[in-house]
Structure formats: C-alpha cells, structure tokens
Image (cartoon, rainbow, N blue to C red):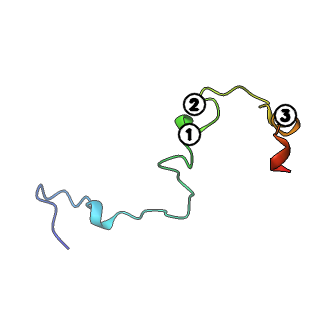
C-alpha cells in the first residue's frame, strides 16, 4: 500500500470502500428523441382510424 506523501496517514482512494449495490443509472434506457414526442407524434395516435381505412386487399 502506498504511503501518504504528506505523511498524514490519510487513506487514499485505493483504501476507500465503494458500495456497488445501488442501481445507479448513468444513462436512461430511452432518450427523449426516441419517444413519440421526440418524433413529433401526438398522444393517442390514430391506430383505430388506420385499421378502419385499410385497403380491402390487406384483409
């Protein structure tokens, strides 16, 4: 173990304990650009209208 250069006996970063049990999120799972809002779409969508207006050959 390296000694404290100032001789104060203060432990360095190597002696520090780090708790890794916390679920710390560095980056989100999904960015706001990858959401409906980010694509400029409105809430609710128009899925019902699209299903009602589909061409007969898609049945």
Which of pointers 1 and 3 lies earlier in the amino acid sequence?
1
Task: Name the element at disc 2.
Answer: loop
Disc marking residue 38: 2
For this rendering, which residue is in front, 57 or 44? 57
Q: Is residue 4 above or below residue 31?
A: below
Disc marking residue 53: 3
Q: Do the CB atoms of the residues marked 1 and 2 lie less than 8 Å apart? A: yes
Task: Name the element at disc 3.
Answer: loop
Task: Name the element at disc 1.
Answer: helix
The location of residue 18, given as percent across then percent down, is 43, 62
Q: Do the CB atoms of the residues marked 1 and 3 lie less than 8 Å apart? A: no
Disc marking residue 47: none
Residue 22 figure quarter: bottom right
Cα separation, mark 1 vs mark 3, equals 27 Å
Identify the residue at image location x=75%, y=28%: 43
Left or right: 12 as drawn, with respect to 32: left
Camera-near label (1 vs 3) is: 3
Marks counted in the figure total 3
For this rendering, which residue is in front, 42 or 50? 50
Residue 36 figure quarter: top right
Q: Residues within 10 Å of mark 2 (few under 14, many from 20)?
A: few
């Amino acid at each position: 173990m390296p000694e404290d250069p100032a001789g104060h006996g203060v432990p360095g970063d190597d002696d520090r304990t780090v708790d890794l049990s916390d679920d710390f999120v560095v980056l989100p799972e999904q960015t706001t650009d990858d959401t409906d809002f980010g694509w400029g779409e409105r809430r609710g969508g128009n899925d019902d209208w699209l299903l009602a207006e589909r061409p007969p050959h898609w049945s």
